[in-house]
Image (tube, helix red, strand yellow):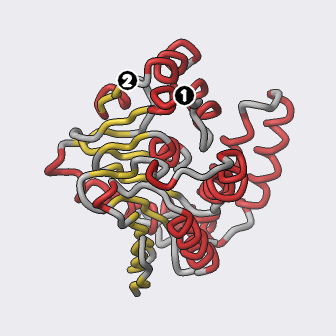
């Protein structure tokens, strides 16, 4: 199934939803219209039980260049509250794995959109730029939250203050992203990873996301309670029964996602 929008593309096939930012002439930079279309597409993805994984990528030579600076709003705070904040929150809370397939430059809010996803796979030619300070701003769209947690305070400060380009391989070496792959292997790697997740235990993936996202703010005891409660739920699931049966039968499991 393919849904047509003006600024994005949404294709759903065999449990994999691929959402493509589609303003290649402006490196897929954000407009209000794109935000509104993304919100609608994410509603489709979240409500479709047949979708087991979401891939977010960009058309052309870039992933996303952040806000379209030819359309700067009067109140940046309002735009963050109305559009960027809800977008990041929805990606984090989506009860399905989300892969950012970073095919080219990811700058400003575009870089932090990628970091809001569960796995970031980048082509070797891609790069990440916290470009905000170059125009007198601070990292937004979750940038000040994600950066220090993923690369530490020293590197986060350097990336934010200097706004230097961070090559994909260095981003992987620093632990900012999951994987950097050669350009010629990029599409196949994304496809294989999406297929693997789409065939996996979707409910378990949802609980893994939730448990890891709250762990940094929890005590050990609080986190042990979360593990107990989620594991109790998962232990009653169809997928757990199938996983055990497959293990004992020395065969590949056939998960149904619940």
Task: Depth check: give the residue in front, 46 or 108.
Answer: 108
Q: Which class describes the residues within 10 Å of circle 2: few (<14), some (14-19), or many (20+)?
A: some
Tell me, yes or no, if residue 34 can be seen here: yes
Above or below for 226 versus 162: below
Could you tell whether 218 is left or right of 213 in the image? right
Q: Quadrant of the N terminus?
A: bottom left
Q: Where is residue 7 shown, x and y percent of the image?
A: 42, 71
Residue 19 image-quadrant placement: bottom left
Could you tell whether 131 is left or right of 224 in the image? left
* Residue at which label 1 appears: 136
Name the residue at 44% across, 18% down: 162
- Tag 1 and tag 2, C-beta contact below 8 Å: no
Tell me, yes or no, if residue 257 can be seen here: no
Q: Where is residue 151 shown, x and y percent of the image?
A: 51, 23
Name the residue at 45% across, 27% down: 134
Could you tell whether 77 is left or right of 146 in the image? right
Q: Disc 2 on helix, strand or loop?
A: loop
Above or below for 107 versus 87: above
């Amino acid at each position: 199934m393919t849904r047509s929008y003006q600024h994005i593309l949404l294709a759903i096939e065999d449990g994999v939803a691929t959402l493509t930012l589609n303003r290649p002439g402006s490196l897929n930079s954000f407009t209000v219209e794109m935000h509104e279309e993304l919100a609608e597409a994410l509603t489709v993805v979240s409500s479709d039980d047949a979708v087991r994984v979401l891939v977010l990528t960009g058309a052309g030579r870039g992933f996303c260049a952040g806000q379209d600076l030819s359309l700067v709003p009067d109140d940046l705070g309002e735009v963050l509250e109305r559009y960027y904040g809800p977008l990041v929150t929805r990606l984090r809370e989506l009860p399905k794995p989300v892969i950012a397939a970073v095919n080219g430059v990811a700058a400003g809010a575009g870089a932090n959109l990628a970091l809001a996803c569960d796995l970031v796979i980048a082509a070797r030619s891609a790069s990440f730029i916290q470009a905000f300070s170059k125009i007198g701003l601070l990292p937004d769209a979750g940038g000040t939250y994600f950066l220090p947690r993923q690369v530490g305070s020293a590197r986060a400060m350097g990336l934010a203050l200097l706004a230097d380009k961070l090559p994909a391989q260095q981003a992987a070496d620093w632990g900012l992203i999951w994987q950097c792959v050669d350009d010629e292997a990029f599409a196949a790697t994304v496809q294989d990873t999406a297929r693997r997740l789409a065939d996996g235990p979707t409910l378990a993936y949802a609980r893994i996301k939730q448990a890891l996202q709250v762990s940094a703010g929890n005590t050990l005891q609080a986190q042990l309670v979360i593990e107990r409660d989620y594991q109790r739920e998962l232990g009653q699931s169809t997928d757990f029964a199938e996983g055990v049966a497959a293990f004992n039968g020395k065969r590949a499991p056939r998960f149904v996602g619940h």
